[in-house]
Amino acid sequence: MNNPLYKRNIISIPDFSRDELQLVIDTAERIKAAPGRQLLKDKIVASCFFEPSTRTRLSFETAIQALGGRVIGFSDDGNTSAKKGETLADAMKIIGNYVDAVVMRHPQEGSARLASEFSSVPIVNGGDGANQHPTQTLLDLLSIHETQGTLDGLRVALVGDLKYGRTVHSLAQALTHFNCQFDFVSPDALAMPEYILEELDDAGMQYQHAATLEEVIPHADIIYMTRVQRERFEESEYQHIRGNFILKADMLKTAKPNLRVLHPLPRVDEIDVDVDSTPYAYYFEQAKNGLYARQALLALVLNQSV
Amino acid sequence: MPSNKLMVEAIEKGTVIDHIHAGAGIKILRWLQLLNDHDRITVGLNLPSKHHGYKDLIKVENRILTDQEASELAIFAPEATVNRIEDYKVKDKFAVSLPKRVTGVFLCPNSNCITRTEKVATLFKLENNKKGLRMKCHYCEKHFNREVMSKVAF
């Protein structure tokens, strides 16, 4: 099987073609259906977290071990030579000599791309500042595909903080390959950035802006919730708008049966706990899919065929 | 002399940058650091132009723009033409063309971009869509208008 991701750096969602996204999803679904293949046997992967991120790190490290690989690394930069002033470029040249691949998270945007230019082994971006977190998007796509049976032609509502939320930007970029239609539900101050809208325009995508969740629930296949942070608003303004962006179970009466609600987690109060017991809630399964999406990605990067 | 003629001496050797849209001339002088040497420079601002109504023009003696400088000029004055002068004659005349990418020239305006702390050459990809020219940082992937760009310190 031809595997275009073999030995590739995984930095940013716009680097992926439609076929490559589909390949990761298909591989993840096969691994989820039949776990236990030792696809990373005899491989060592460095897990380099220059800033702490417990869940992303644990998910990656579990994925590596579940495929029979071994992990070395660090969980924050407190004990590394970065603290002594070593450049990231030098650090990545050295670490690349020890391992078969590097998973990294770093607080600065562009760090993963830069690391990939100095490392002799593939870099997998586990989040570079506010820029990209491609494995989050891959697990989102896996969850959408798993619940809808396709990625093509879906109606996807993106809700909450669309300005600063990197997960919604990457998801919108990825779905431009699949002719989806978007509803954007956000306060004006947290609307989708212009450059993303331009990319959607260039790709010929259809999208609408909506002021409240209620408007989009009846025709949505996927509702992707994110949190509107209280601290971005005056308290009185926040109290006025918050109800428009909080999902409660009784609002889902008009939903289509195939609707599923996703959220990158952690949630605070933007999805009421009474939604958890409805058939529409899928965010915990989505979080679990992180394990399979990351296994699939690492297996593809480190094996000529999977 | 008719009043619509420009009273500027011809130059023996150097560069004439013509058809700069009115208002951009001063910025180009600064951007290309044309004032840093002691060569004679003649600047015309708000000159009558057949195509644009008004235009700016810069004549620089003894200086030939490099291809890189011509590319930078294209970003700030896409309609400009460059005339290379030798022996009082136009040796070479061309319209500037927008480069697809620019390496090592611009500082990334994003203060949290990795290029602000690591010693690597910045790289911007230029995208021209219906909203105008945008410059995308190869590293942090953010998009910027040319108005916010500044040069890296050498």
Image (tube, helix red, strand yellow):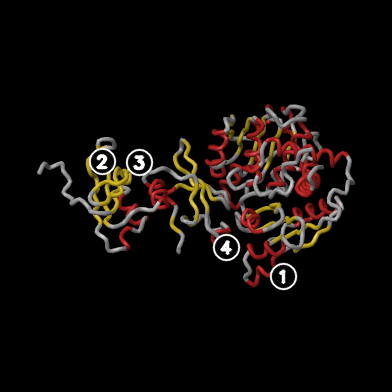
The chain to which mark 2 is attached is B
**What residue does disc 1 label?**
A79
For residue A117, what is the image quadrant?
bottom right
- Furthest residue in direction left, as rendered: B1
- Furthest residue in direction bottom, as rendered: A84
**Real-space CA distance between mark 4 and mark 2, rounded to the nearest whole angstrom:** 43 Å
**What residue does disc 2 label?**
B54
- Whether residues under marks 4 and 3 lie with C-beta atoms below 8 angstroms apart, the answer is no
- Whether residues under marks 2 and 1 lie with C-beta atoms below 8 angstroms apart, the answer is no
Q: Say what secondary structure mark 3 lies in.
A: loop
Depth order, front residue of A159/A139: A139
Marker disc for residue B79: 3
**What residue does disc 4 label?**
B118
**Real-space CA distance between mark 4 and mark 1, rounded to the nearest whole angstrom:** 20 Å
Crowdedness near tag 1: few (<14), some (14–19) or many (≥20) residues, C-alpha within 10 Å: few
The chain to which mark 4 is attached is B
Q: Amino acid at mark 3?
A: Glu
- Whether residues under marks 4 and 2 lie with C-beta atoms below 8 angstroms apart, the answer is no
Crowdedness near tag 2: few (<14), some (14–19) or many (≥20) residues, C-alpha within 10 Å: some
Looking at the image, tell me whether mark 4 or mark 2 is earlier in sequence order: 2
